[in-house]
Image: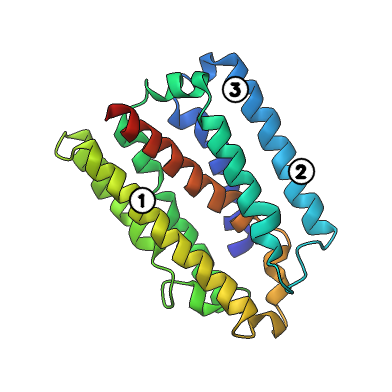
């Protein structure tokens, strides 16, 4: 059931730009770029996972180097293009905030995987992972913005705080594997295989992606 959850949520997030960006279907070049890019990225994640390149817990950490950092740089570049910024200006601020609530489901999946000893409990909401509160707060922040009760500068602060929480979560994973001996457990390498590799390969990038989009919106509004 947990495996199905990771596959299903990852698929939903890959399709989410078509639902979140109402004008996305009319932006032919952006749509084609995204579709090709998403397919290539997913193929890349699956390839390096199947080749075992991520299943090496010696320094430096493979997952941040091969997955998190590259996709973050790609997203910063892509969302900075004028065509994307133009499309982003047509989207309501609260719409992108609401989508971050998907992280509640992510955290439940992580917790379920931790109960099966696939992911360290330290990386769940019982440990140092407070990301579930970000997902829940997205519903509140989104509603406040939708009803014009919260100015964009506070949304910017929320985004920065949420990214800080996400950084702590990443630290919880890295420290568990590299400093606390979780890498020596029987199921430690499951995170480098499907479907669990979709957590750092798809789900984490989408959390970062929508924060980048929201931050760009806030900066554009001044």
Task: Of the two numbered discs 3 and 1 on the same chain, state the one appearing first in sequence.
Answer: 3
Real-space CA distance between mark 3 and mark 2, rounded to the nearest whole angstrom: 18 Å
Q: Secondary structure at mark 1?
A: helix
Residue that label 3 marks: 31
Whether residue 5 sits left or right of residue 149 in the image: it is right
Residue that label 1 marks: 160
- Please tell me which residue lies in front, 108 or 128: 128
Quadrant in the rendering for residue 222: top left
Residue under the point 59% across and 42% down: 73
Residue that label 2 marks: 43
Q: Position of residue 89 (x, y in %)?
A: 37, 22
Residue under the point 64% across and 78% down: 178
Q: Residues within 10 Å of mark 3 (few under 14, many from 20)?
A: some
Quadrant in the rendering for residue 113: bottom right
Q: Secondary structure at mark 3?
A: helix
Residue under the point 38% across and 62% down: 132
């Amino acid at each position: 059931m947990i495996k199905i959850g990771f596959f299903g949520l990852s698929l939903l997030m890959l399709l989410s730009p078509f639902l979140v960006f109402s004008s996305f279907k009319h932006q032919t070049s952006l749509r084609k770029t995204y579709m090709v890019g998403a397919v290539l990225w997913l193929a890349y994640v699956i390839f390096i996972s199947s080749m075992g390149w991520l299943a090496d817990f010696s320094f430096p950490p493979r997952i941040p180097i091969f997955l998190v950092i590259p996709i973050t740089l790609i997203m910063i570049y892509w969302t900075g293009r004028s065509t994307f910024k133009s499309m982003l200006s047509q989207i309501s601020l609260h719409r992108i905030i609401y989508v971050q609530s998907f992280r509640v489901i992510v955290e439940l999946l992580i917790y379920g995987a931790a109960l099966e000893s696939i992911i360290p409990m330290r990386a769940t909401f019982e440990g140092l992972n407070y990301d579930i509160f970000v997902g829940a707060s997205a519903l509140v922040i989104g509603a406040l913005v939708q009803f014009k009760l919260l100015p964009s500068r506070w949304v910017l602060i929320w985004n920065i705080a949420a990214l800080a929480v996400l950084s702590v979560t990443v630290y919880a994973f890295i420290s568990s594997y590299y400093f606390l001996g979780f890498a020596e457990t029987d199921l430690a390498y499951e995170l480098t295989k499907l479907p669990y590799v979709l957590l750092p390969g798809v789900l984490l990038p989408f959390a970062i992606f929508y924060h980048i989009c929201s931050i760009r919106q806030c900066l554009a509004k001044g």
